[in-house]
Amino acid sequence: MSAWAAVTTMAMLLFVGIGVDFGGQLQAIQNTRAVAAEAARIGGQQLNAPEAIRGQGAEASPATARSAAAAYIEGAGLTGSARIADGRIVVDTSATYRTKILSLIGIDSLPASGHASARIARAVEGVEQ
């Protein structure tokens, strides 16, 4: 009976660990995606001002957009990158979730990553131009 109790206890601990740690990883993934989306939005707001003011189009200032997005990612405590591709600012983020219970069986961390992009569009009275 005691061998059965030991095996059952270990199995239950493993199931709890899976629930707790994969739930934590899911939260970390949601955070990396949210940070990527906000960084893309912030990067997309960094317009090439002279052209935008003259009404010649809304385009991102590439260096300023990448810098603003990277600063937001760093401020959120994540690692990542931002780039301009096909008129969009594309942001990738990553983090590592440190396990609480699964570390007892040798799984010390789980990866989390996020991806988002923002397209800059000029609109007049709510209609894209």
Image: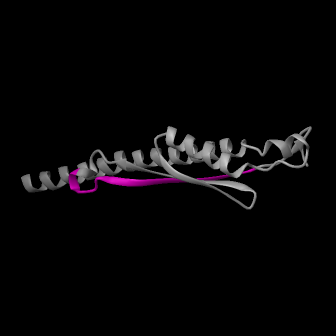
**Residue shown at 83%/47% (left/top)?**
58
User: What segment is highlighted magenta in the picture?
Assistant: 104-119
The part of the image, by quadrant, that contains residue 55 is top right
Most frequent secondary structure within the magenta stretch: strand
Q: Give left or right: position of 1 versus 32.
A: left
Q: Give left or right: position of 57 versus 71.
A: right
Picture coordinates of residue 18 (x, y %)? Answer: 33, 51
Taking depth in this image into account, of 82 and 49 the one nearest to the observer is 49
Residue 59: say if magenta: no
Say whether residue 92 is visible.
Answer: no
Say whether residue 70 is visible.
Answer: yes
Q: Give left or right: position of 118 versus 56.
A: left
Residue located farthest toward the bottom when viewing the structure as drawn: 86
**Residue shown at 68%/43% (left/top)?**
41
The part of the image, by quadrant, that contains residue 85 is bottom right
Picture coordinates of residue 65 (x, y %)? Answer: 67, 47
Q: Look at the picture and state if 129 lies above or below 86.
A: above
Q: Give left or right: position of 31 versus 82.
A: left
Taking depth in this image into account, of 25 and 45 the one nearest to the observer is 45
Q: How is the image coloured?
A: one colour
**Residue shown at 56%/40% (left/top)?**
72
Picture coordinates of residue 17 (x, y %)? Answer: 30, 48
Taking depth in this image into account, of 116 and 7 the one nearest to the observer is 116
Total numbered labels placed on residues in the image: 0
Picture coordinates of residue 78 (x, y %)? Answer: 47, 45
Taking depth in this image into account, of 35 and 42 the one nearest to the observer is 42
Residue located farthest toward the left when viewing the structure as drawn: 2
